[in-house]
Image (cartoon, helix red, strand yellow):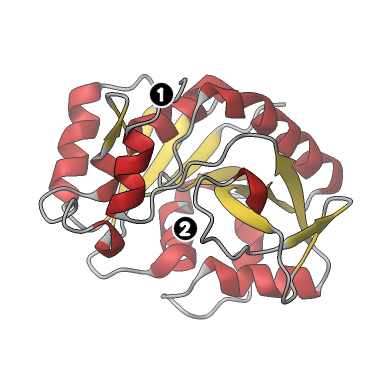
Amino acid sequence: MNIKYGMILAAGLGRRMQPLTHKIPKPLLEINNSTLLERAINLLISHGVCEISINVHYFSDQIKSFINRKKFQVKITISDEENLLDTGGGVLKGTQNFGDKPFFVINPDTVWRKDYLEEMKNLEAIYFKNNKSTLLLVNKKLSIDPSFKGDFNLNNENISKDDENQFIFTGLQIINRSIFTNEKSEVFSLNKVWNKLIKDKNLLGLESNQKFYHLNTSDMYRKIQSLNIID
């Protein structure tokens, strides 16, 4: 059973990527002649997603023009944020049309490639087996950036946190809007939701085996650009 809905987080200011993002939003930066946003969209489409929501704020007109120009063969809805809502608030606003169906949330900061398709299927299998929010994580050892401290620990699909976190969140997850049921804030981070899910033992994870390329600084962008990444 393929999940049919997806949300792409594309509203951030990209401050850590300056000066590259002075005149262009981070999701429109290119790796191997494909924008980060296009990579995220194509990954979702290749998996079978047929409706995508994209939140925008910084240089939103550029992203809208890019979407219109590309004419992707899926329904794409733009969730325009006049004021930034953070990751959780952005997802809550941008997925109102998804009803009670599960959906992918994907962050285009990661250089997504076809190699992730099999892991998307496995992530989906864990989600449907347990009906719990499920994150794709990667061991710090596979990150091209050694500065990452790690976000979580993973043990038999169960996610936890401590002072020695060994796993990084890749930027791909499956959730359902029910996790926001008790959220009263308009602006909030997904970390707030994850922490509650971890406390209730309701957050699961899958370990990715892919080399992790993540754009968080202009130096890292140049480094990744210089590599021959197979799409």
Quick check: 223 left or right of 95?
left
Front residue (pair 99, 111): 111
Residue type beneath disc 1: Asn
* Residue under label 2: 91
Quick check: 176 left or right of 16?
right
Whether residue 75 is visible, yes or no, is yes
Res. 121 image quadrant: top right
Whether residue 139 is visible, yes or no, is no
Q: Which residue shows up at 72% across the image and 36% down it?
A: 124
Quick check: 125 left or right of 61?
right
Query: Which of pointers 1 and 2 lies earlier in the amino acid sequence?
Result: 2
Front residue (pair 177, 33): 33
Query: What is the x, y in percent for residue 203?
Result: 75, 60
Q: Which residue shows up at 20% across the image and 33% down it?
A: 66
Q: Note whether 51 is above or below 33 in the view shown.
A: below
Query: What is the x, y in percent for residue 75?
Result: 38, 30
Q: Which residue shows up at 58% across the image and 43% down it?
A: 103
SS class, disc 1: loop
Res. 2 image quadrant: top right
Q: Which residue shows up at 18% across the image and 25% down it?
A: 69
Mark-to-mark CA distance, 1 and 2: 33 Å
Query: What is the x, y in percent for residue 71?
Result: 26, 21
Q: Note whether 33 is above or below 215 in the view shown.
A: above
* Residue under label 1: 228
